Amino acid sequence: MIQTMHMPKAGLEHLITILRRDGYRVLGPVARDGAVAFDELRTSSDLPIGMREAQEAGRYRLVPGIAGEIFGVVNGAGSLKPYFFAPDETLLEVRRERRGFKVSEVAPAPPPHAFLGVRACDLAALAIQDRIFLHDHFRDTHYEVRRKDAFFVAVNCTRSAPTCFCVSMKTGPEATAGFDLSLTELPDGFVARSGSPAGEAMIVKLGLSPAPGDQEAAARARIDECAAGMRRRLDTSDLPRLLYDEAENPRWREVASRCLSCANCTMVCPTCFCHTVVDQEELDGNMSRRVRQWDSCFSLDHAHIHGINFRPKISDRYRQWLTHKLASWIDQFGSSGCVGCGRCITWCPVGIDLTEEVAAIRADAGKR
């Protein structure tokens, strides 16, 4: 039976110290360039203490929060994805030799990473990425190396952003799997739970004591209140069939009239995995690198093959993205590709909201 423990807020500094001493590079939410993203933590003071974020469709800014609150910022544009599925990485090198050439695989050798302050939606997204890169006949060795030995400290959400809809996707606001240690913040500390043997060992190292019953109840009440107060909803009851049946719905053209095809939504999405492979040659012709780079189904070149583009219109590309995310992804991987983090809504320059688009398509279908 998993025991709930009490950790004072000063224990967070102790946790970071232990992780760094154990050889981890510790990353957590850090205020940077007017937003919050995962970056290296050296002390707990690097966290956005006393800050919150105000976000809506197409809008994001950091604002003053509650004094002493450590994890008041729900999320920013950055997720866990870049640390496992790198935006730009060399897969192999080809070097010219006196007689022929030599091909060498370039294997990453990163230090083990510990992530502090991971939200439930991002853990759910990482589990989806695992199914893509690890649970098939061909395992992605670059992803596998980075994924191995990672340590996750989850933070259960006690408030939601206006763009969140994780309750609809059954991915939050409480982390239920994929973490080593989970924390629920209270005014006087954290309620901590272990989720793995490594998490249990960390609780022993921290010297934590059992949480009183009133703290457990307070933590549960905060999580439940967050779930009940979530403003956005996505009805998934008739997915994926709805989107398959409505491939010619006029709403695709309407949303395309607003969409910039900028690919922001796919860049901030914690599960999108489209990529391209390019060869980069040295000027002297003695070496070339095969490089994998993030790509997007919104980019014009992504659907260009054999001299034609089979998604020439923005409406084609938006339909592909949304239908894959909420429908064909289920056929491929057994789950939706959306975890309800709301980043695609917040970071869309024109504020396109996929929950509104699905609702509009459903309403059109209901009229016929």
Image: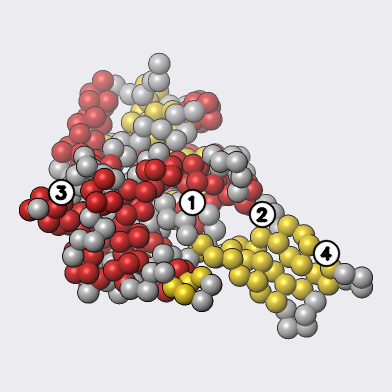
**367 displayed left or right of 196:** left
Q: Residue at x 78, y 83 (%)?
A: 284
The label shown at residue 146 is none
**Tags 4 and 1 touching, CB below 8 Å:** no
**77 displayed left or right of 86:** left
Q: Which residue lies furthest to the bottom in this view?
A: 283
Q: Which residue is drawn at 20% across and 34% down?
A: 224
Q: Mark 4 points at which residue?
A: 102
**Tags 2 and 3 touching, CB below 8 Å:** no
Give the amino acid type for the residue marked by disc 2 in the picture. Answer: Pro
The answer to whether any part of residue 222 appears in the image is no
The label shown at residue 108 is 2
Q: Name the residue under label 3.
A: 231
Nearest to viewer (mark 2 / mark 4) = 4
| Label located before the other in sequence (2 or 3) | 2
157 w.r.t. 245: above or below: above
SS type, badge 4:
strand
